[in-house]
Amino acid sequence: MDPAADPAADAVAIEGVMRTILPDRGAEHRTDGPGRAGIMGGMRFKPDAAGLVGAHVMSWVSLSPSFIPRTWWMTAVNTGISQTFGYVVGAAGTAAARAVGRQLGIEIRIDEEKARPAIETLPWLMFGISGLSWLRNLRAQTEIAGLMETRPIRSREHMVGVVGGLALTAGLVSVGRGINAIATHLSSALKPVMPAPVAAAIGAGATATGTALVLDKVVYRRLLEWLSKAAQETNAKLLPGRVPPVEPERSGSAASYEAWSTLGAKGQAVVSDGPRAVDIEEATGKPALTPIRAYAGWREGRDLEETAAAVVAELHRTGGFDREVLLVLTSTGTGWLQEWSASSVEFLTGGNCALASMQYTYLPSGVAFFADRISPVLAASTLLAAIEAELEQRPVERRPKLLVGGESLGALGGTKAFEGLEDMIGRVDGAVWSGLPRFTEFWESLVPFRRRGTPEIAPVIDDGRHVRFATRPEDLVTDVTGVPYGAWDSPRIVVAQHASDPVVWWSPDLLWRKPDWAKEKAGSDVSRSLQWQPWVTFWQVASDMPQSVSVPGGHGHRYVEDMLQYWAAVLGQDPLTDYSTIAQAIRRTIVPNFA
């Protein structure tokens, strides 16, 4: 903990912020002259007492730990959204109770003199509990940082997040009251010409519709347009340290049908990075080939079928169909590929392989994850179908082994190119999917049917005969319950998922349903203090996602060195062999800060 931090002073600071952003009772419904009356006259208000209690309680819950050590903005988002939810529930509950009481003719009176001590004590009690929750969360964040092998959050930084959350709460509540004031004004205007219940329903419906239109047309669409424009500009920029390849085995070279300038920033990284024959020979001590990398970028006016055909043309040009292994990777948004996945196969096969992939959007993965989940599915299906059609025309003995894979959004799209596990087994010779979201059809078709006693983070499916889930390479040999696996039939499929990866464990039903992973608490790098809470956990895990790529490898959404062992297993090699020499070589072929 930061020794300069003073919890008592911090508590006073929180109280001051609350008093500043949430005005006093004397301001309720007050106007500053005739011109201030009307719809917005009720915007100056004393917050609902039950709403404040609900907000406080939810702030305690929001400070509970999740997967990733929190930055200040993660704390602000979690606290603000949770407090707003608590305020709405508390205020709505009070309003509903009053309405029911009026209908039943029940009126509850409180003796203010007798209640005064409790009323005066309650705020201090709640602030005290808030302070304790804050200190407890600091300890939890230190624990999570230790599990993640990263630095703990500083107390001052955490305090900034708490204050930011209070400000966000005040803003959201004010917006909500403004919308409510508009609905009330519309209802009042309609009451002279229609029954009150009808007027209230029309006022509420019209306001809700208008709000939805504003959010969709003005906020969401404008934001998406801005993000799209920024992403398109980024796609056209050259990433540091990348140069056009000189090897004809690479797309973007002088011999390629695909010009360097058309590959996009991440596509240029794909063909620029990675090992050549000399790198593989130095690491393995054996003769090697320069791996083939066939890639086609997104182009205006070129559809997915044409882009896939361009990749196939590159494979023909480079002799990719004559290599021992053909690796088809589905990219994420922006066309990014997991370099550790591609390079692992290239080193393990002595370069006798070809990589095929293509870009289907220039949107960042985070945006595409929520705004466009169709494109990765169509891209994966289209490219795989085009390649399979070419393989069908070759004699069986001249066909390369067909491997597939993808990470995150690429895993989501890549697995949906198949109708299920049996279809995947029947069409490919192996696969590695890393960071696969749990709400995908492939994941949901397998994990609920796991062997009894195995946890959701590392389920055993059909005794591991074809597919094995792994949080670490050792899980490929012995399951998490300590039971050794039997024979692993070909084709082999690995689903790599870290227990601390929020991309895997986030799902819409976190809003209302406690998942098995939260009940089982089986993750070795997940805090035992993590507790599922309705509404709160959904936002906590969502805010964990952007930061999950910034933690050390082997945690969160960072699948790096372990990919060597996963691909070794798929290729029929020993996954527990020491591959440190190859791992060091892979690091040398990746441009710094882009590993």
Image (cartoon, rainbow, N blue to C red):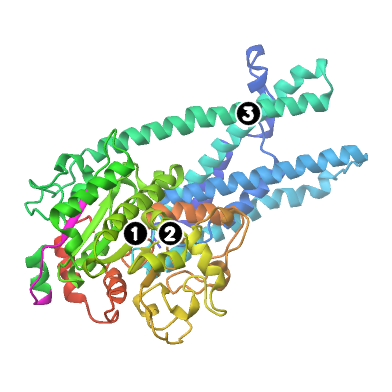
Front position in the image: 281 or 71: 281
88 versus 289 height, above or below: above
Residue 93: percent from left, percent from top: 75, 45
Corner quadrant of residue 491: bottom left
Q: Is residue 563 visible?
A: yes
492 versus 135 height, above or below: below
Residue hosting label 2 = 418
* Disc number lying in front (2 or 1): 2
- How far apart are the alpha carbons under marks 3 and 2? 40 Å
Residue hosting label 1 = 406
Crowding around mark 1 (Cα neighbors within 10 Å: few <14, some 14 to 19, many 20+) is many
The residue at the point 42 percent across, 54 percent down is 545
> Disc 2 marks which amino acid?
Phe
367 versus 199 height, above or below: below
Helix, strand or loop status at disc 2: loop
- Quadrant including the C terminus: bottom left
Q: Which residues are magenta?
A: 284-295
Residue 589: percent from left, percent from top: 14, 61
Corner quadrant of residue 465: bottom left
Name the N-terminal-most of marks 3 and 2: 3
The residue at the point 10 percent across, 70 percent down is 288
Residue hosting label 3 = 209
In magenta segment, residue 240? no
Front position in the image: 193 or 91: 193
Front position in the image: 571 or 483: 571
